[in-house]
Image (tube, rainbow, N blue to C red):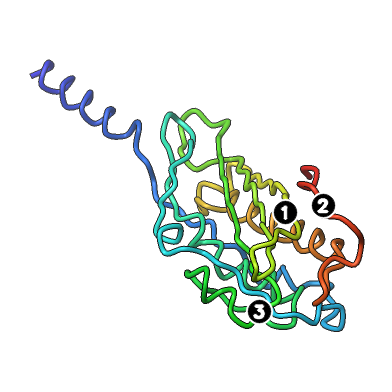
Amino acid sequence: MIRIAKAISAVAAALLVGCAHPISITPDTTRLAIGQDPKQRIEAKAAYQVSDSDLSLEVTTPGGGGDAVRYFAYRDMDAGLEQMLGTVFTHVSRSSDAQRAATGTDYVIVPVIVTNSGSDGLFTWPPSNFTVDLTLTIRRPSGEIIASPRVVGHGNAADGERIFDHGIAGRRATEDALIKMKDQLHGLNLSKRGLQSSGVPELSPLN
């Protein structure tokens, strides 16, 4: 009987370790418009291109206690990205097709999102720290690259927060990345004629 109990305990422990728990890292879009003057938006049409395969891509990164978390990085950030770009450009649309995105627009913007997470907790799986590395490649409809600004957003969560809100560190990281990117885009001084300064910027330094 004791052996059976030990075997059951071992199976239960195995099931509790090494799992990939689903979370959401969808940002609070209301934060993206705070302190933004609509008159400062760039008078231009921008289309951001996100493929269907990116939207359906599920990412797995470390959590705590030997477990992992899984989420859809592009899908979760999609609405936030559109909201952020809407604070920068007067007209924003999204397309999964490169040719459609380039039609009738001044800029085509392609995001690349790289995420990572971790935890200082040994017995709880929700991540206590999260990073979102976001690069936007900005092209003219002809394909000419205008700029490739890059930022890294960081998010942290205390034990009491992440136990009840499993994705809070991730959401804070996405919000941080989008707010930093908004500032980067305004700093590029874009217009319908392209960059008003000479030359094509290199990747921006990490924040």
Counting every numbered tag in the picture gives 3
Dot 3: element? loop
Quadrant containing the C terminus in the rendered view: top right
Q: Where is residue 112 in the image (x, y as percent from the top left)?
A: 59, 52
Q: Do the residues labelled 1 and 2 touch (CB within 8 Å)?
A: yes
Q: How crowded is mark 2: few (under 14 residues within 10 Å), some or many (20 or more)?
A: some
State which tag comes first along the sequence, 3 or 1: 3
Q: Residue at x 34, y 38 (%)?
A: 19
Q: Which amino acid does label 1 sit on?
A: Ser
Label 2 – label 3 distance at C-alpha: 21 Å
In the foreground, 48 or 127:
48
In the foreground, 198 or 130:
198
Q: Which amino acid does label 2 sit on?
A: Pro
State which tag comes first along the sequence, 1 or 2: 1
Q: Is 119 situated left or right of 86 in this image?
A: left
Dot 1: element? loop
Q: For mark 1, what is the residue?
A: 148
